[in-house]
Amino acid sequence: MTQGEPKSAYRQRVYEAFADRNRPFGEAVESALTAGSERLGVEIGFLTRIEDGTQYIEQSVGDHPALQSGQQCPLKDAYCRQTVEQDGLLSIQDARSSSAVSTATYEAFGLESYIGSKVLVNGATYGTVCFAHREMRPAPFSEAEELFVELVARLVGRAIERREYEREQAERRAQLQAEKRRFEGIAANSFDLLYRIDTDGELTYLSEAVERMLGYEPDELVGETFTTLLTDENADRALDAFDRLLGGETIQGMELTFTHCDGHVVAMEINATPITEGGAVTAVQGVARDITERRERESELRLRTRAMDAAEVPITMADATEPDNPIVYANGAFEAVTGYSRSAIVGSNCRVLQGPGTDPDGVAVLREGIEDKRPVTTQILNYRRDGTPFWNRVTVTPVEDETGTVTHYLGFQQDVTEQQRITRLVELLNRVLRHNLRNELTVIEGYTDFVDDPPEGLDVQDKIRQPLRRLVSLSERARELENIAKKARDPARLDPTELLSGVADRHREQFPAAIVEVGVDTDRDICAGTELGVALDELVTNAIAHDPADHTTVSLSARDDGDWLVVTVADDGPGIPPMEVAVVEAGQETPLEHGKGLGLWLVNWIVTQYGGSFQLSADDGTVATLRLPVVEADQSVEDAARRPTALLQ
């Protein structure tokens, strides 16, 4: 046993050896034998196979010449004889004095100590797993060691069962492939269904045409009885025909009806011929022709429509033959993402999703692709039916008919708002930190000129510390915003009275001179994350901290507004600078407009994360308006939760 390694580690190594189904069998066995030898403190471990009274060494670890892979001996001369003959495992401390080991066996192998357990495969003895040493053990193998060996044997047996099963499956697949290749040349060029049935009535081969005709992939039906596909009224006629085929007759032009996988009936004309070997019928093969082409086309159309209906990706189809390409189809996912029901969107153009923030260049890319009748993909800002913006990756693909004429445009939409929000956040942090770092370092550099000879009354050290403190504060806010952004959305039911009162109480305690008022005029709850409290704290703290007056008044209110709940934070201070308002309204910072801090971005991120919007006004004091989703008393949070919106309001 390796010094210091716990016994449980060896058991874990054995489990891990066989846990990976892709690991080669021999490699797994070698790993288990090695772990076992180390666990038991012996030099040899081996796996045997017992067949017709002979012991074959399948695999081993250790340097014993007679116990290497490929070696064999009569079972009567092997240590394993007693192992396979008795119940339970065989454990020998001193082989020289043990009645379980004959003198001839001992002299042949020279093993003083031995422990082995039967390997059972599908209930029958396959062989043994054994561990041995050339020297006598000072003490018998313990119960724990015996259980360990039994574990190794059991796992080896299961691995062999799995190996034999996979081998049988591979042989069966090879047989099926051989049968398929016999029909390959014909099937590749045939519009009809080619099939083969064994004498028990089981399908052994079907060409790929079966998927077009009946909706099944060939492998789904192999092994099934052919009558399972027949409609009830055809079963007796088909079985009678099959009996005649087994009697050597040939069937020509027989019409039968089959059930498509989606339930509709398909009529086919059947030709069948018996296959004989040595004068006996061994199988039946034939050709089936679909004589319900019109119904088959309808079936395929229904199948495709169901697939699009069930798709999680928003899909639309527009008529390319009509002016303005009106939408003729939209699936459920489109309604879930955009808020437009099928009835509301059919007959309209997807331009209804565009709004004030939609980039004309992105629209032009789509228009040019449609005009050129070629696939096109672009990413644009769209608006849901309730007016909230989201980033949409749009792909439009032309669909042609049999003549090559474009008849429809297939549209795929993907809501990529989350990705865009993260991208915008990273850009913001880089831009703001870079801008403020440059400005503050410029200030610091200016004051360093006075370090050695400061002007009278100028505290140079304090002037240098101030920008450093501002940089540290900015860095901390950036980290806070980053942590909030990384946090997974967790919408909850928030009581507005409890929420606003909690914010007010915290600030009354922190700023005793300030007046913080609360007014709630709604009996509905907010659907948002608990971090909304962080956003409100930020707004109230800004209002109080940035007001030079001693007695700042801040009013917190909540009221209903249709499907929304509006929370307002208003103060009587000097008002937020117009540049800061412009930054929030634009949803981004420009090279000439850098916010002094990241607090307002933090508020905007939290509110839009839960599908809301954030606006500021600074006419008389500052008014922050948060429009937030509502969760009704009889509504679940899951149903009320809204998707995140773009950082643009």
Image (spheres, rainbow, N blue to C red):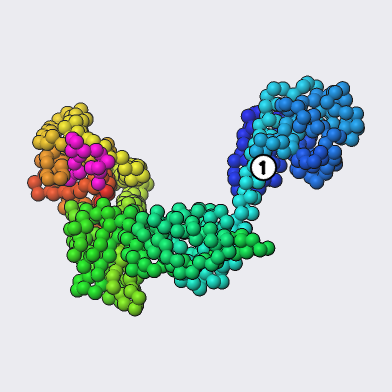
Instruction: Tell me the quarter of the picture where residue 358 sits.
Output: bottom left
Q: Is residue 138 left or right of residue 145?
A: right
Rendered-image quadrant of the N terminus = top right
- Label 1's element? helix
Residue 239: give x, y in percent of width and height: 49, 56
Stretch of the chain drawn in magenta: 626-642
Q: Taking 77 as reference, is 366 left or right? A: left
**In this rendering, position of residue 469 left or right of residue 165:** left
- Judge whether residue 307 is colored magenta: no
- Of 129 and 371, nearer the camera is 129
Report the residue at 73% width, 31% height from top. Answer: 117
Say if 580 sits above or below 457 in the image: below
Task: Residue 35 in the image: state x and y as whole percent.
Answer: 69, 36
Q: Residue at x 11, y 40 (%)?
A: 559
Q: Is residue 649 left or right of residue 111?
A: left
What residue is pinned by disc 1? 160
